[in-house]
Image: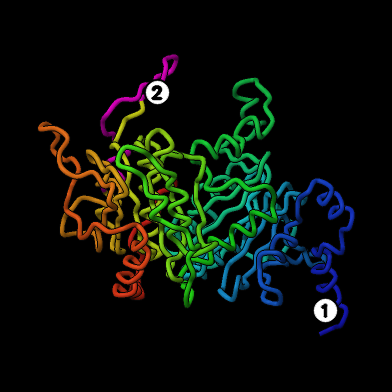
Amino acid sequence: MRRDDIKALETARSGLKDAARPEIVTKVGKTGKLTARERIRLLLDPGSAVEYGSIAAKSGAGDWVAEAGGVDFVGTVAGRPVVASSTDYTDHGGGYGAGRLGRLFGLAYEQRWPVVLFVDGGGSRARHPRAGLGHIETSGPIGRFSFLDGVPELSGWAPVVAIVSGPSFAGHASLAGFSDFLISTPGSSIGMGGPPMVEAALGQRLKPNELAGAEMHELSGGIDLLVEDEEAAIAAAKRYLSFYDNDFASGQPMGVDLDALAPDADAPCDMRAIILGFCDADSVFELRPRFAPALLTCLARIEGRAVGVLANQPLVADGVIDNDAATKITRFVEICNTYEYPIVTLIDTPGCVANWRVKGQPQTVEPGLTRWHARALIAHQQRTVPLLSVQIRRGRGLGAALMTGASTTRGVQALRLGWPGVEIGCRDGFSAVVDHNAFDDVIPPRETRERVARVLSLLGKARQRSAKKHPIDTW
């Protein structure tokens, strides 16, 4: 082989590096953002990255054609193999053809590797419009998945994390929406139709964040976490992945006096403080904190064991379970079930309510159930991971059932505890399901962590699966 051929290939590849485009790197840095390669470098362990698809084609004149619009890698995060891909908004607006991405989705599916996607851009584009130019493609689709169907197939099988730190529309927004953990930054936007499409249809010009801002999505449940910048987003992605099949040898509690935190029978308490005092120190990672705040969903550890914590928050709307809270329960139970996290529930709720929103009229809230509440019961019915519950105070109506599932032989609770302030007995003679008093024990709050940890240790780890249980609801 001629050395000139090797040099030409090396030149094409080196042109993709940040060192070859200092003006763009400086421009991106001034906005407080990271380049695509800087993102990957912060995410993956040093020395672990393997790039896929830097070269896209060879021209009829014999010149190598570099890939455009994004970068794809395989590497490790804390020693675990991960697929990592980032669009590059400075190159073709981040609209890359993703010739290798579908192939990497297939690899992730085969190996059950997590995937982390940085998806800011205006959607995918025709890969390389070179028809008739005599170019020879080197990056056509390989394997069973395409650009968009790979993430839905991975749902419920391997964690998919998406990070949006700019405008994300069309195909990019679809990838974000299909993920099971979506992180965004202030000023970002996620929507199916971008400002030009909206202007063409409605004659109104909006900025991306005005059209589909991340701040709006945070309140409506469209994203899981809003963080201050891309560095914080990468740190959050790493933390989310740290729970995946990765128990610690041990963990220490915060040393909080749970007896002092326990509420009286007629007074609420801050359930977030109980979670922090009950779980291992510095292990609690809350998801969707501003969506349906009357319900708390956290990944955490108890003596090193990764668990999901589901809790009512009586300081917000008295801890009622409305449509949004029921949706939040459903998706969290599905995440825990697919990734084999035992669930610990802390119960203090007066029951379920339905929110009715009719355009032009005030919102109506009334006792009752909706199809969103039914979905939570269905999620529990298909749950196979252990569930342990602690009723702090109230569990009226179907509220306790939405937190733990119906009391049937399928998915029955592994442990059901109560605290001394727990409400027992029926409040009236008309309710079909009120205030269950079927507890395995009523204990002092200070004994809760040890009791739960012992049962978790007896239950052991789930066996390796050869197929996924179910996908995860996208919202």
Q: Could you say where residue 227 lies in the image, as x and y percent from the top left?
A: 63, 48
Vertical order, 317 against 394 (above or below): above
Q: CA distance from mark 1 to mark 2?
A: 65 Å
- In which image quadrant can residue 152 be found? bottom left
Q: Nearer the viewer, residue 360 or 2?
A: 360
Indicate the amino acid at tag 1. Ile
Q: Could you say where residue 71 lies in the image, as x and y percent from the top left?
A: 69, 61
Vertical order, 23 against 158 (above or below): above
State left or right for residue 237 relative to residue 260: right
Q: Please report the residue visible at 19 percent of the width from the left and 45 percent of the height from the top.
A: 424
Q: Secondary structure at mark 1?
A: helix
The mark nearer the N terminus, 1 or 2, is 1
Q: Could you say where residue 168 lies in the image, as x and y percent from the top left?
A: 63, 43
Vertical order, 273 against 222 (above or below): below
Q: Please report the residue visible at 42 percent of the width from the left and 50 percent of the height from the top.
A: 261
Q: Which residue in the structure is indicated by mark 2?
A: 357
Q: Please report the residue visible at 28 percent of the width from the left and 45 percent of the height from the top.
A: 402
The quadrant of the rendering that contains the C terminus is top left
The quadrant of the rendering that contains the N terminus is bottom right
Circle number at residue 29: none
Q: Nearer the viewer, residue 263 or 379?
A: 263
State left or right for residue 236 relative to residue 335: right
The magenta stretch is 356-377
- Verify whether residue 359 appears in magenta: yes
- Assess whether mark 2 and mark 1 are in contact (beta carbons under 8 angstroms): no
Q: Which residue in the structure is indicated by mark 1?
A: 6
- Verify whether residue 79 appears in magenta: no
Indicate the amino acid at tag 2. Arg
